[in-house]
Image (spheres, rainbow, N blue to C red):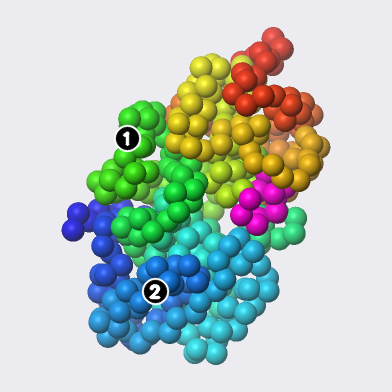
Amino acid sequence: MNLETVSLPLGERAYDILIGDGLLDEAGARIAPLLPRPRTVVVTDANVAAAHGERFAASLRAAGLDTDIVVLEPGEATKSFAELERLTGRLLDLGVERKDAVIALGGGVIGDLVGFASAILRRGCRFVQVPTTLLAQVDSAVGGKTAINAAQGKNLIGAFHQPALVLADVGALSSLPARELRAGYAEVVKYGLIGDADFFAWLEANGARVLAGDPAARIAAVKTSCAAKAAIVAADEREQGARALLNLGHTFGHALEAVYGYGGALLHGEGVAVGTALAFDYSAHLGLCRPAAADRVRAHLSACGLPASIAALPGGPAYDADTLLTLMMQDKKVEQNRLTLILARDVGEAFVEKAVDAGDVRTFLATQIQQRSGARPAAPPASRRNHP
């Protein structure tokens, strides 16, 4: 097996991210050495259990691990207080100890919920991420952010809790619906846009191979993405500075997700795709980057089957610029009631901009909501060009 390893150096909380095709069959052998006693609990959802559950459990048992499996309902609604309470109660009933391994087998919803449950159970239990979606493999399973959603917005209640190991089996991606795979690809694109123009160019040339299932292309994309995130997290684990770059497109995207209600009408990665395009369009609106850079971003997202503008989104609830701005103000990066956005000077040159003019964002959003899909934003007034 072609196995790649990315290490995240965090002192006593350091861990490896293993990337390959067929890792689900080796999971037991990889996890067993971490444990003082052969005890695990696997938490997954019904869809992943049907696709991979028996195979994964067989790997654990072959390594001599005593294993229970907890199956939850799929979907974003599972990241809730009610499900958190049920899950922690179940883990306590199963006698999970701090040094046992609670294993998150699934996508971002399972990883976020299980990670948060592990963070608060007995004031901190060991857990392992086994992400089965592209989005989770390149983003949510790496870095220790765990959370559930609140009525006020996405991921507003959570904790930093690093996994002991991440096993990213790109073979598991073959069971994903095409729409979900594309949604995860939006997070891959992000890594090229925030600081690696060469990687973005590689994606323009090879993104179709990644989406089509080429194992080598998928391993390369996941490894590069994980290495980029690991470097940022190692330098800023608690998001006090550069780690905020990983939220490119997310402030806009989370607001759109909230409007659509987390029910599947708009997937997280689809919201991020639109949000990323909006971040570049807003940067062009401010005169920070050339409109051609924003056009290039939208062109690649669209070529990969992702929505790249508000107008490209599916029909849904009515909303206006004020609605989106109110939701954006719930973003975790807001400081002293001032909005923070990740903006860009070019492909591969993103930066954190604090104290963004909320009134200007409202005007920009109103224009975007009214525009036809693919229309170029109007040129910004001269007074806003070359914004620092």
Horizontal relation, residue 57 to residue 184: left or right: left
In the image, residue 70 sits, relative to residue 174, either above or below, namely: below
Picture quadrant of residue 327: top right
Report the number of numbered marks.
2
**Is mark 2 in CB contact (under 8 Å) with mark 1?**
no
Residue pointed to by mark 1: 206
**Residue depicted at 60% across the width and 84% down the height:** 89
- Asked which secondary structure carries label 2, the reply is helix
Looking at this view, is 39 or 52 the one in front? Answer: 52
Picture quadrant of residue 103: bottom left
Percent position of residue 112, x then y = 54, 63
Percent position of residue 267, x then y = 58, 50
Residue 12 visible, this orientation: no
Residue pointed to by mark 2: 53
Q: Which residues are magenta?
A: 255-265
In the image, residue 338 sits, relative to residue 343, either above or below, namely: below
Horizontal relation, residue 279 to residue 219: left or right: right
Residue 52 disc label: none
Residue 110 part of the magenta segment:
no
Q: What's under tag 1, amino acid-wise?
A: Asn
Residue 263 part of the magenta segment:
yes
Horizontal relation, residue 272 to residue 11: left or right: right
On the rendered image, what quadrant is the N terminus found in? bottom left
**Residue depicted at 49% across the width and 89% down the height:** 95
Residue 252 visible, this orientation: yes
Picture quadrant of residue 3: bottom left
**Residue depicted at 61% across the width and 54% down the height:** 264
On the rendered image, what quadrant is the C terminus found in? top right
